[in-house]
Amino acid sequence: MAAYNTPEGRVLVKDILALYGIYPHDYQLDGIIICLDGRSLLATMATGSRKTGFFSFLMIVMIHISRNPTIALGGVTFPPNPAMVLVMPTKALQYDMEKNLSKLGLVCVVINGDCREGRHLGADNGGRWKRQRRAEGQSEQSDQIR
């Protein structure tokens, strides 16, 4: 049974995102509420059509509900510190996505062949891994996400 793919769920998601100054397109809301109910989403869209909003806004909503379980609909809650794995086809896109997701207050770490080779880890040759371990241990991953 749908909890979030309902008029009430749609309003809740819009309200949550508005707290962060995010006002999604209707088609983004359509995808987010479907995913919140545990269904898969496949979106094939043109470059620059805001596909990133599907998963970044979804993660913001999941984090918010996980920290405020009393607002969950239909008993559908999310674990503390929900996580998502994104697979990107190029390193340039990976690093660009890391920067953009971080601007939204999401903890994001790129893990690719550069990590194994130590090219972007800094002088301590492990800064990125240490940052990821710290993020995993934090209950408040960002001051922006309440």
Image (cartoon, grey):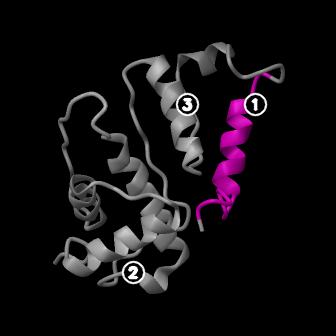
Per the rendered image, the range of residues in magenta is 125-145
Residues under numbered marks 1 and 3 in contact, where contact means CB atoms less than 8 Å apart: no
Image quarter hosting the N terminus: bottom left
* First in residue order: circle 1 vs circle 3: 3
Q: Is residue 79 visible?
A: no
Q: Residue 145 shows which numbered tag?
A: none
Q: CA distance from mark 1 to mark 3?
A: 12 Å
Residue 130 shown left or right of residue 99 in the figure: right
- Residue behind mark 1: 127
Which residue shows up at 21% across the image and 53% down it? 27
- Residue behind mark 3: 110
Q: Residue 72 shows which numbered tag?
A: 2
Coordinates of residue 30 in the picture (x, y in percent): 21, 59
Which residue shows up at 68% across the image and 19% down it? 120
Q: Secondary structure at mark 1?
A: helix
Which residue shows up at 68% across the image and 60% down it? 143
Q: Which amino acid, by three-letter code, is at mark 1?
A: Gly
Residue 56, placed above or below residue 32: above
Which residue shows up at 27% across the image and 27% down it? 47
Residue 144, placed above or below residue 5: above
Q: Residue lying at the far right in this picture: please name it.
A: 123
* First in residue order: circle 1 vs circle 2: 2
